[in-house]
């Protein structure tokens, strides 16, 4: 016999009520909820292993969002007539949810966690992606899986100068601004979106409106959790610690890490110096050191690097490559480096380089974008390629990864704002960015190179679009450092990665983690 389901609801405004329910579907999952608005129904489940895998030293979180074709009364068009691998839209939605959820878990939690979100009933006017993050967070909230806070996500659009929370498909199509924002009760966790040259003040207003709406959704999730009676989270096995080893690592390496970090050397020189020092740290433990002690020493060494570099930026106001906090890396640009493509450009910023081409096609070259809810053609394509040699690595070439889809989408949405009206511009346009070197901000290099290549090809874009990645490093004493044009290491060591694209007159795209 089915147990009695538990549900809560909240109002998005304008009579648009959203229902969250648990206890009816997928009851063997650690947490499962359905979120319903109109005819749109989303099922989210979460399951976590009770113990981490032996020797695992990272947090394996997987998030997959999929739209079932049956949700819209359709049969998939593939040969096998069943849902295949995730399409780009589903990958992008999965990434948005992953980026919002990942910071919620304790840093020492290493158990496998799988979050699956499915659109099981669609509504022609309800956009499911923002509700999907709400569903994923609610599933975690009603489970015993340890998380630090509850989050939610909303979409903000602007129509006729008025901001709208979670617009309908029709409203979004007519809007000049779209941002997806995820947040906890106090902090913004993720921002992604595009705009037709919006002002900074408009972005701030959109974020404030989104945060107010998100707090309502967080309150509803907390109410659902209380109704279910979830008051504690499961205990979990924490990684082993050894204070004696930690102190040895700090005493041996702290000053040397600082010296390497202050040199202002190149990425490869710095990486090699760090690697050699790590070998010395392990050797300093002596031949009697156990495998566990060596493993812990490597972890403590990475923790030490994190602390030393962050303090250097905050206290000394200097960066790993010797730049000031607000200094952009050296720039080099070239148009038409390739003779045959319709348009091409080479953009280099420090140790990050994009070679971008533009190709014209006809209506026959338009891309069919198919999902459960709709199928449509697009005339502007941007593909981002990130080969392993760009970071001096050897890896298997297994096709396009989620990261490449996400970075390409940000660049595409930014450049799209300056593209001519598709109803009057006859050509299909494909932009391809090949990253030849990478040390941070390769998606922003793609925007810059793409803008140059489009003009080189003769596409009538009225203004250039550029982009830069900003970083933030904070400390418990309230001191902080804002970084302009961050490196790859600064992205890894910092608290925020905030990519902003735009013209000289306004913002065209944003992405924040």
Image (cartoon, rainbow, N blue to C red):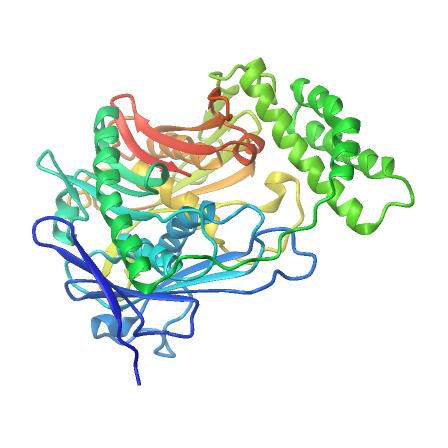
Residue 152 position within the rendered picture, expressed as x and y whole percent measured from the top left: 31, 49
The residue at 54%/31% (across/down) is: 352
Query: Which quadrant of the figure contains the C terminus?
Result: top left
Query: Which quadrant of the figure contains the N terminus?
Result: bottom left
Horizontally, residue 125 falls left or right of residue 357, namely: left
Horizontally, residue 170 falls left or right of residue 210, namely: left
Horizontally, residue 488 falls left or right of residue 485, namely: right
Instruction: Identify whether 485 is placed above or below 195.
Output: above
Residue 185 position within the rendered picture, expressed as x and y whole percent measured from the top left: 32, 41
The residue at 69%/32% (across/down) is: 271
In the current view of this chain or complex, which residue is farthest to the bottom? 1
Instruction: Identify whether 61 is placed above or below 314.
Output: below
Quadrant in the picture for residue 18: bottom left
User: Total of numbered circles in the picture?
Assistant: 0
Q: Is residue 418 visible?
A: no
Residue 510 position within the rendered picture, expressed as x and y whole percent measured from the top left: 34, 35
The residue at 66%/18% (across/down) is: 262
Which sits in the foreground, 504 or 326?
326
Horizontally, residue 141 falls left or right of residue 12, namely: right
Quadrant in the picture for residue 136: bottom left
Residue 251 position within the rendered picture, expressed as x and y whole percent measured from the top left: 78, 27
Which sits in the foreground, 354 or 468?
468
The residue at 14%/57% (across/down) is: 17
Which sits in the foreground, 99 or 352?
99
In the current view of this chain or complex, which residue is farthest to the right? 287
Q: Is residue 397 visible?
A: yes
């Amino acid at each position: 016999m089915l147990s009695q389901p538990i549900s809560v609801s909240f109002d998005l405004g304008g009579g648009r009520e959203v229902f969250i329910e648990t206890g009816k579907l997928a009851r063997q999952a650690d947490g499962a909820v359905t979120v319903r608005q109109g005819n749109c129904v989303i099922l989210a489940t979460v399951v976590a292993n009770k113990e981490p895998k032996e020797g695992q030293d990272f947090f394996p979180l997987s998030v997959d969002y999929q739209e079932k074709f049956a949700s819209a009364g359709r049969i998939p068009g593939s040969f096998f007539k069943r849902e295949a691998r995730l399409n780009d839209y589903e990958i992008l939605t999965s990434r948005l949810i992953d980026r919002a959820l990942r910071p919620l878990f304790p840093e020492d939690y290493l158990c496998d966690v799988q979050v699956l979100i499915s659109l099981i009933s669609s509504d022609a006017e309800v956009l499911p992606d923002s509700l999907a993050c709400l569903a994923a967070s609610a599933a975690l909230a009603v489970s015993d899986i340890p998380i630090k806070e509850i989050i939610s996500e909303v979409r903000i659009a602007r129509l006729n100068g008025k901001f709208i929370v979670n617009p309908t498909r029709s409203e979004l199509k007519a809007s000049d601004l779209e941002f997806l924002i995820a947040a906890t009760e106090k902090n913004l966790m993720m921002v992604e979106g595009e705009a037709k040259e919006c002002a900074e003040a408009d972005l701030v207003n959109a974020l404030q409106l989104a945060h107010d709406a998100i707090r309502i959704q967080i309150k509803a999730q907390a109410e659902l959790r209380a109704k279910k009676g979830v008051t504690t989270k499961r205990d979990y096995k924490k990684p082993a610690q050894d204070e004696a080893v930690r102190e040895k690592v700090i005493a041996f390496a702290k000053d040397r890490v600082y010296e390497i970090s202050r040199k202002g050397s190149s990425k490869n020189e710095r990486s090699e110096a760090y690697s050699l020092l790590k070998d010395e740290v392990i050797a300093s433990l002596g031949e009697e050191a156990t495998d566990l002690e060596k493993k812990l020493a490597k972890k403590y060494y990475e923790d030490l690097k994190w602390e030393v570099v962050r303090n250097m930026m905050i206290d000394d106001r200097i960066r790993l490559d010797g730049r000031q906090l607000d200094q952009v890396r050296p720039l080099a640009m070239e148009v038409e480096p390739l003779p045959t493509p319709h348009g091409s450009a080479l953009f280099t910023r420090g140790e990050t380089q994009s070679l971008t081409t533009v190709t014209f096609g006809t209506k026959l070259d338009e891309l069919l974008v198919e999902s459960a809810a709709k199928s449509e053609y697009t005339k502007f394509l941007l593909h981002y390629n990130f080969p392993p040699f760009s970071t001096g690595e050897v890896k298997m070439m297994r096709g396009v990864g989620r990261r490449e889809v996400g970075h390409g989408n940000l660049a595409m949405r930014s450049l799209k704002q300056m593209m001519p009206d598709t109803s009057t511009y006859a050509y299909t346009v494909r932009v391809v960015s090949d990253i030849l070197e990478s040390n941070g901000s390769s998606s922003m290099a793609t925007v810059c190179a793409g803008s140059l290549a489009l003009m080189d090809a003769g596409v009538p874009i009225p203004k250039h679009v550029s982009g830069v990645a900003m970083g933030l490093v904070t400390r418990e004493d309230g001191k902080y450092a804002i970084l302009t044009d961050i490196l790859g290491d600064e992205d890894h060591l910092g608290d925020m990665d905030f990519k902003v694209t735009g013209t000289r007159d306004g913002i065209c795209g944003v992405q924040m983690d």
